[in-house]
Amino acid sequence: MDPRIETINRLADIIKERIHGLQPVLGIVLGSGLGKLADIIQDPIVIPYRELPDFPVSTAVGHKGNFIVGTLGGKTVIAMQGRIHYYEGYGMDQVVLPIRVMIRVGIKTLIVSNAAGGTNLGYHVGDLMIIKDHINLLPNPLIGPNIDELGPRFPDMTRPYDPALIKLALKLASELGYPLHQGVYVGGTGPSYETPAEYKYFRSIGGDAVGMSTIPEVITARHAGVPVFGISVITNEAHDDYADDYVNDGDDVVNAANAAADKMSRLIEKMIETL
């Protein structure tokens, strides 16, 4: 057996034992400053990443590093309160290991969220953007020998973000009175923030927002045939006409994400109720 499958199975078995027969049907990845959604999960069972053998530990600002299993929107969910990033020094197999473990635990849908810089000149701090497509500048997590039992060698990425889930989010956001953008997310390695010239380049190639995560998780889920919904909180205006004293600051990004987290949390909860 492929040692990667052995690791996935072992971790999934540990989680199943810890959650006492609960069956999560939906996985959620909570990005920088967006762990607030975890606070409304009912009857939570918290599993710190540090308690799982051979599991990567999240070190990024605003990422607590827990799996949380409980009820949200009337469904049993498993949420990642903090993700794993390539820039933390982990290989791609480790970056996407949590997604593969959640799939093995039994999720049927994946929701991913992130904090992103708005390269689109019409985007402002606190806006929410549905991810309708992406441009990947990170290493592809499927490089190397394919794990055939997880998915095909060359998975289709024509619709990486599920059209039905996007349609549902737009409907519910309209009912809630939440304006939503729909845009293209550009994923880079980080951890340095991008230069003004890079922001201009991303905008010129069709990118509306830029970040340092998410896309490897989406590729992994689609490889396994799991539908994905993605949403970004715009935490800074990633333009190229800054004042002379402007700086991008990580704490400001987390604070902006926290300020928008209530809207995002309510929207996701309503989506789960409806699914």
Image (cartoon, helix red, strand yellow):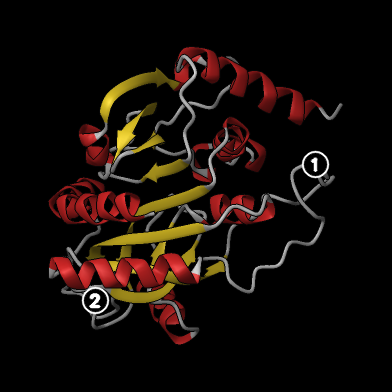
Using the image, tell me which numbered label, if any, was put on residue 123.
2
Q: Nearer the viewer, mark 2 or mark 1?
A: 1
Q: Residue at x 37, y 27 (%)?
A: 68
Q: Is residue 223 left or right of residue 235?
A: right
Using the image, tell me which numbered label, if any, was put on residue 149.
1
Q: Nearer the viewer, residue 12 or 58?
A: 12
Is residue 59 placed above or below 49 in the rendered structure?
A: below
Label 2 to label 1: alpha-carbon separation:
41 Å
Q: Is residue 111 left or right of residue 234?
A: right
Q: Nearer the viewer, residue 261 or 189?
A: 261
Amino acid type, label 1: Glu
Q: Quadrant of the C terminus?
A: bottom left
- Assign a secondary structure to mark 2: loop
Q: Residues within 10 Å of mark 1 (few under 14, many from 20)?
A: few
Q: Mark 1 or mark 2, which is nearer the start of the sequence?
A: 2
Q: Nearer the viewer, residue 69 or 4?
A: 69
Is residue 92 placed above or below 174 in the rendered structure?
A: above
Q: Quadrant of the N terminus?
A: top right
Q: Residues within 10 Å of mark 2 (few under 14, many from 20)?
A: many
Q: Would you say the residues marked 2 and 1 are in contact, meaning their CB atoms lie under 8 Å apart?
A: no
Give percent across and percent down for residue 103: 59, 39
Say if residue 206 shows up in the picture: yes
- Assign a secondary structure to mark 1: loop
Say if residue 185 shows up in the picture: no
Q: Residue at x 16, y 74 (%)?
A: 243
Amino acid type, label 2: Tyr
Give percent across and percent down for residue 168: 35, 67
Is residue 35 placed above or below 179 in the rendered structure?
A: above
Q: Residue at x 30, y 78 (%)?
A: 240
Q: Is residue 168 left or right of residue 93?
A: left
Q: Quadrant of residue 100?
A: top right
Give percent across and percent down for residue 50: 46, 17
